[in-house]
Image: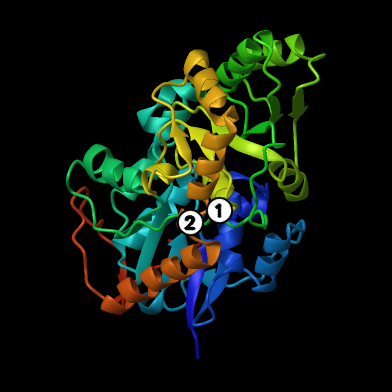
Amino acid sequence: MTAAVHIDVTNLLRDPIRTGIQRVERELIRHWPEHSRLVPVIAGRRRFRVLPCDVLAALVDGAPVRHRFPLARVLPADPARLRLLNPELFFDPGRARLYGELIRARAGWIGWLLYDFLPWLAPNYFHPGASTLGMPFLATLREVPHVAHISAQTRNEYAARIMHGHGRDGPVVSLGGDGLGLDRQEFSPGRRLFVALGTLEPRKNVAAILEAFGELWARGHNAELVVIGMLRSGTAREAELLHRFRNEKRLRYIGTADDATIRAVLGEARALVCATEAEGFGLPPLEALHAGIPVIATAMPSLDMLPPCGQIRLSEARPPAIAAAVETMLDDATAARLWREAASVPVRSWRDFAHDVADWVMASSEAGKAIPLPYSQPRALNQTNGQTALSRISVRP
């Protein structure tokens, strides 16, 4: 019988968008290995509930899941054998409390997959109060006995900035670059298109990319630019520039795009351009390199874990630096060399990611080692006939 791993899909079920962490969750579920069985759970007001396993297939396919599950059983049914994986970032204090109580009751294995700490370490890029709203998550994280990280940067920030040297050891499990299903591309001098892909928000510096191309167009360059991403709050400059260049035939703006549209655009691309100033990971450059497409990019966690091949690394996210990098890429001989380099970059697959997460869960849960909690002492729990009373930990949604 395969071992069961319970996976917390609360956010994915309630807000099944196709980007960000929800996208990572879908790929994790899609490629989870057969040697262990994923069982979905959702956090309610006072308890976790186990959901039917067919919910996972619907979530992976992107189908809406609108059913209520009033009869779903309570978690944990067998506290000692529990394996509970949280692959989500959340801001719900009630959900944080549920995890805290399970951890203090030492109910089996509990592990979190960590993405980044930007809301706390770079709060200027987020709406006022975002870091405060996330404090219950951060406080509970300090008690979580098992953690894994999507990048070396995340692991370093967890150890030094969040846990102040008192963190748990955990693996770095990089994300996959093959999620778009884009075939390996080949260079040709006729490729004149540059692509900026991702949500438009201040830290992504799309305004700087637009200004750089404006300079290039004013100098007579025929490079084309496609910007893909929804405008978020705080992007008045981006909106202004898109309006200014609305009659520029060398610019296309696509607010929302499915994977097929992104594949079609990248299928014409000479390079991807990313000028972010604060990035939690940076998946688009990874996906471009997986298809053999070079990137022009600032430093970011996804690229820091790769050799600098097929890339023009930007020292700053300012229009002159971006324009100079684009001019370099417009040279056919340089572009051909960078394309050859990009084809050699070892980019991991989502299958690699999911199998590594599963191996981490199974290996660390089977080790069965108790880990001291440096930030808090276990609370006194009610005892009934020598058994820890867990009924108050999990309650109906």
At numbered mark 1, what does the secondary structure look like: helix, strand or loop?
helix
Above or below, comparing residue 86 to residue 358 in the picture = above
**Amino acid at the residue labelled 2:** Val
Dot 2, how many residues are within 10 Å of its Cα: few (below 14), some (14-19), or many (20+)?
many
x and y percent of residue 285 in the render?
Answer: 53, 42
Q: Residue at x 56, y 72 (%)?
A: 39
What's the mark number on residue 347?
Answer: 2
Choose the circle earlier in sequence order: 2 or 1: 1
**Residue denoted by label 1:** 290
Query: Foreground: 238 or 309?
Result: 309
Q: Quadrant of residue 78?
A: bottom left
Alpha-carbon distance for marks 2 and 1?
A: 6 Å
Q: Residue at x 67, y 57 (%)?
A: 183
Is the Cβ of the residue at disc 2 closer than 8 Å to that at disc 1? yes
Above or below, comparing residue 30 to residue 154 in the picture = below
x and y percent of residue 317 in the render?
Answer: 46, 21
Give the residue furthest to the bottom.
1
**Amino acid at the residue labelled 1:** His
Above or below, comparing residue 77 to residue 22 in the picture = below
Q: Residue at x 68, y 13 (%)?
A: 217
* Quadrant in which the C terminus is drawn: bottom right
At numbered mark 2, what does the secondary structure look like: helix, strand or loop?
loop
x and y percent of residue 105 in the render?
Answer: 31, 65
